[in-house]
Image (tube, rainbow, N blue to C red):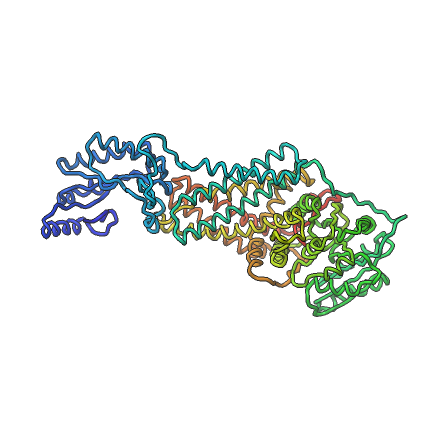
Amino acid sequence: MGNETLLRQDLTPIELIAAIHQVKRELGLPVSTAEPWHVWLANPALVRAVDVITIHLLPYWEGLPVADAERFVMEKLDAVRAAYPGKTIVIGEIGWPSNGVEIGAAKASRVNQALFLRRFFVDAQRRGLDYFVMEAFDQPWKTSFEGRAAGYWGMLDLDRRAKWPMSGPVQETPEWPMWAGGSVLAAGVLALALLSRRPDIRFQGKLLLVLMVQGFCAALACVLLAMSGKYLSGIASIVWAGLAAGQALLLVLLLADSFDLAETLWGRVWRRRITPVARTSGRRMPKVSIHVPICNEPPQMVRRTLDGLAALDYPDFEVLVVDNNTIDPSVWQPVAEHCARLGARFRFFHLGDHPGFKAGALNFALRQTSTDAEIVGVLDADYIVSPDWLAAMVPCFDDPMVGFAQSPQDYRDASASAFKRLMFWEYAGFFQLGMVNRNERNAIIQHGTMSLIRRVALDDAGGWGEWTITEDAELGLRLLRAGWRSVYAPKSFGRGVMPDDFAAFRRQRFRWAYGAMQISHRHWRALFSPFCHDLTLGQRWHFVTGWLPWVGDALGLAFLLVGLVWSVGLIVAPMRVEFPIVLFMLPSIGLFGFKLAQILALYRARVECGLVDRLGAALAGLALSHTIGKAVWKGLVVRSAPFLRTPKMDDAPALVTGLWMAREEAALLALNWAAIAGVAIAHRLATMEAGLWCLVLLTQSLPYLASVAVSVMASVPAGALRPLAPPAGHVAAPSGSGD
């Protein structure tokens, strides 16, 4: 009567002994109770009350390695026998689980279960022991209140199949050859499909890609194999399926990054690279209508932009300045007066309260465009263009199938502060790396400023989309779907100014990520459906994989919140809540390390900056992870959001304001580090799983640490951390659409 009653402290020893005596009196039968070895040694009065000592010997719960388990069992059995000579002893529970969490040096596995029980059976027969194995069959119903190991103590599984033979070799996963063969076959097919798109990649790149593809397929096979060997309830199945899907998406992201790395570093042939050169004499130069949308922009900044346009070395162009939603006349009237001074080529329109945000202003400008204009150019209010911009880029339209041409965004204020230097080099990666690769497959992203668009293509597309906050990228995708070609020239023809503080930097990236989700909603058939053929495979690849890192940030935010909740359980109920399996912890750590190595390698190969600036670019990008994650989740749920304008040339904030701007990230950083400390204390880092979990939490906290650091850096007054000026003429630009 009673099972581990004193161990759980359900009764006191006196109460349990009284109950035993009562049963003896009323039934007249021999009575025992079951307790672990140490409870019997500590309670001789209980021994006197029972007729038989029923002892539990479970070295797994003691945290012992399986090699020492048999010795431990016999030592404790002999200790109880020596303490109570002449008393009958029955081993009530003895065994080892085939699955479960690590407890100290004890590892639950099929092989360890076989090793322990085989050795015990031999010793038990030799010593003539009476025992009950814990247990005959797996009992997964126990996992809900005793943990994962509780469902796997059986010598037979739930279908009454023996987990291992009584003699001969034992394999942890007997079906591993099938899974391994399947992963190798899948990896081969996938690697061949990728390499067939770029057969010119050198051997080093092919080797890297093959290894990464095989690692991807093997990791996914291991996750699925681990799921196949588990007893899962309905809720557990949903949780595991969600975790597996998240891991699969992370591995796909890793695969896409690997292909990007291989073709960038080791590709031999670049078929669509162009070097624009200004040509005006002896050729037809069609008229260009340049549209400059403005909203509450500093007048002195806009005047500098217009002066740059007035200096263009091009025979036939007009400039339409459209101000919308600016209420204060002292802001827009100086611009109107400056347009009048510049002459008939410059026309100014003040729209007041006008719908459609920037796209609405651009659509208004399109309706006011001269009928003989064949090319439409778009320029942000802060950009000062080079005189040869049009003369060099308009010849791209000699090909009648070219619908739009793009040159990089660049910035003239990188030397203003250390914060702006970080942004400068973070922006640089997209145009020096991403856009170059995209151009090879006619898949560039149109990003508003410095864009030139064929007038008939723009009209046929129906103008700018006023439903999205990234109207430029959405228009570019529509033009590609309509069959127009794009051209990207990596030479810089204009420079603007960057956001002045972390809040503006973050708001800008939120708009790009949210807009990408809007575009994915509207164009999902073209991007994902096998029955829609508007886009080529290469175009789909670049648009989908180009936004995958942002989806990865959204997953990172979800994993962070889940990890915090999970950590609370690990701290509050360490015996009831288990760590996730290692297969779910390793990919997030590995992906973070690979992404950092990839950024450093790509920047070293293609972006002309030193190691400090490469690390600074990585830091700036990392600081935006939380903002991007929120934008993606919001974009997946909410279909419309207000246009988030990026302010320019505002004063840098005070230090306290800088910290306040990163308050969400700072709070999550503090919670993450508190969780690390709590788990480390509660579990004493006694197992590999505990150490890995703390490492996962630390890895997840790094983007939040970066956010706080960059926000504080942005708050430092200009000049306090003045950086070296970037190389003259160097291109830097954002990894998204618009500004």
Instruction: Report the front residue among 99 and 506.
Output: 99
Residue 447: % across, % down:
70, 53
Quarter occupied by the C terminus: bottom right
Instruction: Report the front residue among 224 and 291.
Output: 224
Residue 519: % across, % down:
63, 57
Please tell me which residue is depicted at 14% across the width and 35% down the height of the picture.
85
Instruction: Report the front residue among 692 and 194.
Output: 194
* The quadrant where residue 41 appears: top left
675 up-or-down from 196: above or below: below
Left or right: 563, with 286 as reference point:
left
Please tell me which residue is depicted at 63% across the width and 42% down the height of the picture.
260
Kindly give the residue lying farthest to the right in the view shown. Answer: 282
Left or right: 601, with 725 as reference point:
left
Residue 736: % across, % down:
66, 52
Instruction: Tell me if residue 732 can be seen.
Output: yes
Tally the numbered discs: 0
Left or right: 4, with 656 as reference point:
left
Please tell me which residue is depicted at 28% across the width and 42% down the height of the picture.
136
Kindly give the residue lying farthest to the front in the view shown. Answer: 531
Instruction: Tell me if residue 722 can be seen.
Output: no
Residue 135: % across, % down:
28, 42
76 up-or-down from 701: above or below: above
* The quadrant where residue 153 appears: top left
37 up-or-down from 142: above or below: above
